[in-house]
Amino acid sequence: MNAYDFLAAIESGISIDWQRFVQTMRKAGVEPGAIKRMLEPASNYAKKTTVQIIDQQAFDNLKQLYLPTLVVSDRISAALAGDSHQVAVAGSMLVIQHSSWQHPQVALSRDGTHWQPSPDSEQHLVIIENMQNFLHLESSLQFIIQQCQVNVPRHAIMLAYGAGNAASKACHANYYRQFTAIHCLFDIDLGGVQIYAALKQLLGDSVPVNFLVPHDIEQRLQQSRRALSNDELAELHKVHAKHPELHGVLQLMYQTKKKLEQESYLEPMHE
């Protein structure tokens, strides 16, 4: 029993092991003299005894210092225990868009398992890492189809706002698996590659996952003003070993020592 359990038993008139109670409270910083001024056991010799409260105010003040032990099983109980962040939210939502919709919609799961609405059959999902590209629906669709050679009709493409690392949340897997394929329009940098790798690990062989690269990526990297650090190059090498399908784009990143933000896809290439 902890301090709270002992105090609750005393208040309820339940017999306790008095000596163990005194030892427990002493370890908690409450000296035996203070205990004796507010509590009196019915017996000093019995193994277990009821205890009379002789100073109710002092007892109430002491009890306020100790809270019951909470079993943390979900976000709500974690919040009651004082730190909701120690448990992930049970569900999630993704902002999605289709060329036939006037406004984006939300795919929602309240429990992390069941998602609504379900996509139409034969739909491909393109996860867009950054909001700027997601908001420019027509430009992004055109870029995906023409520059990244995604040979899929426009009506068969759904866009999802990935919000960086949030795209690879474990509870999104059941939504992604409803699609024919997942295409990743991410930054051509360490972060983008790592999110792709996390998605591949999350989904395994359940659905194809493709990292989208424009056909003129070499020119785009050469013109980029964003350099890769030696640390980033070293981390990219680790990803390369596990994902040979990225050999082409990673090799160009090594050669140019450059990276590329996907927002640049929305601007014409500078000649």
Image (cartoon, rainbow, N blue to C red):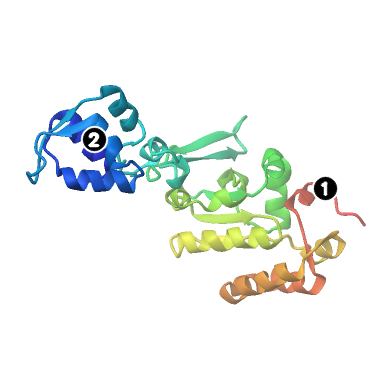
- Res. 256 mark: none
Residue occupying image coordinates x 9% and y 43%:
48
For the residue pair 58 and 133, the one nearer the viewer reads as 58
For the residue pair 204 and 163, the one nearer the viewer reads as 163
Q: Position of residue 230 (x, y in %)?
A: 75, 71
The crowd level at tag 1 (other Cα within 10 Å; few <14, some 14-19, many 20+) is: few
Residue 219, by quadrant, is: bottom right
Of tags 2 and 1, the one toward the viewer is 2
* 188 relative position to 166: left or right: right
Q: Is residue 116 above or below residue 151?
A: above
Q: Is residue 5 visible?
A: yes
Residue annotated with mark 1: 267
Amino acid at pointer 2: Lys
From mark 2 to mark 1, how far is it between C-alphas?
Answer: 79 Å
Residue annotated with mark 2: 36
Q: Secondary structure at mark 2?
A: helix
For the residue pair 251 and 271, the one nearer the viewer reads as 251
Residue 161, by quadrant, is: top right
Q: Position of residue 109 (x, y in %)?
A: 42, 39
Residue occupying image coordinates x 56% and y 74%:
242
Q: Is residue 125 visible?
A: no
